Amino acid sequence: MAEKIKVAVVTGGHPFDVPSFRDMFNRMSDFDVYHQDLDNWASSKRDGAYAMYDVFVFYNMHTWGILSVRKDMDQRIIDALNELGDATQGILVLHHALLAFPDMQVWSDVCNAQDRKLRGFKRPEPIRTLVGDREHPITKGLDDWETTDEIFLIDTPTRGSSVLLTTDHPESMPILGWAHNYKHARVFCYQAGHDRGAFTNPSYQKVLRQGIEWLAGRT
């Protein structure tokens, strides 16, 4: 039996539906999931835990130059972000994490989206997700689906990304999911995932599961 994929899920800087979010990951029994805030993730660089993870899932939204309530942690966080991709641990940038660290070039590079300014926003409403690449391991076996989710309008990824998921919603960014390489790491950016409307959707769950497996190099 293959060893479980070890996943660090980084949160903070934005409220979210905690029970539904955690329940979604609890259902992924082939993963060992470690929920943590940004401070603890950055501190794991020093205490040795960082190296044990296969995938980092960022579901945080630290903005306006605020990284930590403890200012002595800021440089440690910056250093950890700058060192992403030095090893092969996969990186999943999920939903509002696309808007995190708006003044940091490193995060734009990780996301492969140079203009991440939010130009439009709508509270959850029906939105169709269209599978743009049915052969990629992240989207293999998926059909188009509809769910209720938050709408973002930000810049599309720059060249060099594989477009995996799109939408025809007129007020949304047209590309919802894309994959690329950042230094030595695989990266998957996925705009969807505001609350239980997404978290309980079987297609959304399948995207995350297959995305994490791909990021960990299992597919």
Image (spheres, rainbow, N blue to C red):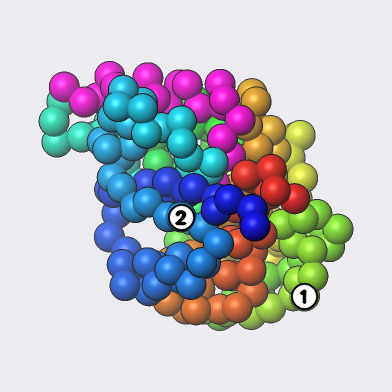
**In the image, residue 132 lies at what x, y percent?**
80, 60
Give the residue at x 65% y 37%: 186
Residue pointed to by mark 2: 32
Say few, some or many: other residues with alpha carbon within 10 Å of mark 2 (under 14 / 14 to 19 / 20 or more): some
**In the image, residue 10 lies at what x, y percent?**
37, 46
Relative to residue 73, is residue 105 drawn left or right?
right
Q: Earlier in the sequence, mark 1 or mark 2?
A: 2
Q: Relative to 35, does residue 84 appear above or below in the rendering? A: above
**In the image, residue 51 lies at what x, y percent?**
46, 30
Magenta region includes residue 213: no
Magenta region includes residue 74: yes
Residue pointed to by mark 1: 143
Residue span colored magenta: 72-93
Amino acid of disc 1? Asp
Q: Relative to 137, does residue 203 appear above or below in the rendering? A: below
Amino acid of disc 2? Asp
Q: Quadrant of residue 167?
A: bottom right
Give the residue at x 60% y 78%: 202
User: Looking at the image, which residue sits at the far right?
Assistant: 135
Relative to residue 28, is residue 123 drawn left or right?
left
Query: Between residues 46 and 128, which one lies in front from this camera angle?
Result: 46
**In the image, residue 5 lies at what x, y percent?**
55, 50
Gap between marks 1 and 2, in whole Å?
28 Å
Dot 1: element: loop
Give the residue at x 33% y 31%: 44
